[in-house]
Image (cartoon, rainbow, N blue to C red):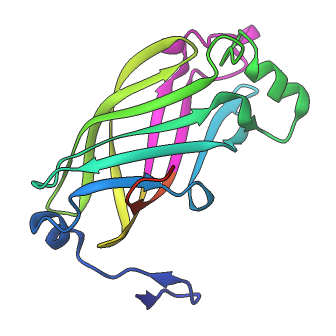
Amino acid sequence: MTAQAGGSPREDTDVLALARNGTLAGQWSLVPAESSVEFTNRHFWNTITVRGRFGQISGEGTVAPGGTVTGQLVIDAASLTTGNKQRDKHLRSADFFDVAKHPRVVLSVQRATLSDAGTLNAEGTLEAAGAAEPVSFTADVVAASPDRVRLRAQLTIDRSRFGMTWSPLRISSLPATGSVTATFTRGTTD
């Protein structure tokens, strides 16, 4: 490991070499304390941005010997917070995530392949509020070593595809952005 500007440790191993020689093959588990899922949505006719995050996440991944990745990120929908209790209660209601009936948001990656640029091109499904929609996105490999990988991705989601259309006077935009930072370590956790 080497230090980045600011003194934080950074793995400096070539992810392409690790993937191509099979070093990354195997089971991987998300490290929740080093991972985050955040969201933003433009509100009040695009004059403000509402920001929030989910406090409880888990996940796993598998890297095949050829470097293809599959995996799943599971988010506790009730763990969302925007810093406003009234708004959070509304977001958990049937107008949005409907956590009483659908307690989890699940991002499943059916296939991700590593590009020559060292990014993961992923295809999968996002399940939220009782609906499932196909998604594709690119994840940046921030750091990689034989036992630890850190990824960062951003997805723009049309929330109407999940029945989240509440917006009197169209005060809130339908596209929302999700940002994921995920650290995985080799092996499974029990």
Where residue 165 sits, quadrant-wise, is: top right
Query: Magenta part of the protein: which range?
Result: 153-180
Q: Residue 169: within the magenta?
A: yes
Q: Residue 47: within the magenta?
A: no
Q: Above or below — where is 17 with respect to 8?
A: above
Residue 5, x across and y down, in percent = 52, 88
State the residue lying farthest toward the front: 190
Where residue 117 sits, quadrant-wise, is: bottom left
107 vs 35, left or right, is left
Residue 84, x across and y down, in percent = 87, 36
As rendered, which of 98 and 70 lies closer to the eye?
70
188 vs 166, left or right, is left
30 vs 111, left or right, is right
Residue 97, x across and y down, in percent = 65, 19
Q: Above or below — where is 174 with respect to 51?
A: above
Q: Tell me how many marks there are.
A: 0
